Image (cartoon, rainbow, N blue to C red):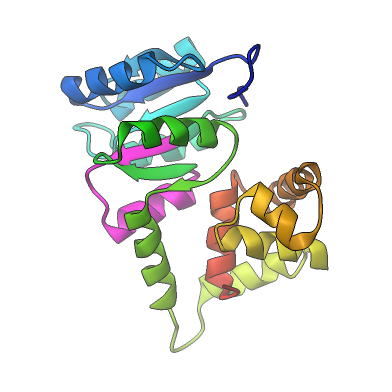
Amino acid sequence: MAGVTGGDAAPVRVLIVDDDALVRAGLSMILGGVPDVRVVGEAADGAEVPAAVAAYAPDVVLMDIRMPRVDGLAATEALRALPRPPEVLVLTTFDADDQVLRALRAGAGGFLLKDTPPAEIVQAVRRVAAGEATLSPAVTRKLITHVTAAGPAGPDPRRERALRLLGGLTEREREVAVALGRGRTNAEISGELFMSVATVKAYVSRLLTKLELNNRVQVALLVHDAGLV
């Protein structure tokens, strides 16, 4: 995970993946003027992502969804299966519910729409590099709508799986997981649960290992699937 603040911290290395050359140029301009972020490469299709990641070693991949050969969702799934994958921040004009959920379940650390203001895109890159979830307000609303509309009439395998996994947590781990499900930051969890931010980070790392998940967004989705928030 790259350092994202501080004078001597290494800049966040970003790979931009989009089939529109103008979009790639615009994102490069936005991120190019930020001292703690460095655009290290570009790709025009999901099929080019594995080679680009191997060549440029990015910390964060800014990933479009709609691309002609391999879409961003398939590319994200492939990336997150790597032993040491970069973080993925999906940036798209397309925000259908199934696309949002598939991206997040695949391990994307964030999902933003392309009309997001430049300053917020920069901040999202920093947050994703630091392991923080980043969702645009529109995407968050869709996720909440999906969860609240998901009340099953019969057995729900996804809910049963989520309850089984979360049932193996300690009480404190479960409290942290539920806080993640509510979208809380590390600082907010620290204040709510009366523990240091460093301790919160340790709990989040423990949860990811114990639940075999890639990032805190997936923990949040698991908590939602279990119906705990």
User: Viewed as shown, does residue 82 lie left or right of 33?
Assistant: right
Give the residue displayed 43% in from the left and 17% down from the top. Answer: 34
Q: Is 150 placed left or right of 215 in the picture?
A: left
State whether residue 170 appears in this view.
Answer: no
**Part of the protein shown in magenta:** 89-107
Q: Position of residue 124 (x, y in %)?
A: 45, 36
Q: Where is 49 relative to 155, above or below?
A: above
> Can residue 41 be seen in the rendering of this structure?
yes
Question: Which residue occupies 35% across, 33% down?
Answer: 63
The answer to whether residue 124 is above or below residue 182 is above
In the rendered image, residue 106, in percent from the top left (x then y), is placed at 46, 47
> What residue do we see at 59% from left, 45% from top?
215
Q: In the image shown, does 211 or 179 lie closer to the viewer?
A: 179
Q: Give me the residue at 32% from left, 21% from top.
A: 30
In which quadrant will I find the C terminus?
A: bottom right
Total marks in image: 0
Looking at the image, residue 55 sits to the left or right of residue 229; the answer is left
Q: Nearer the viewer, residue 157 or 181?
A: 181
Among all residues in the image, which is located at the extreme bottom? 153
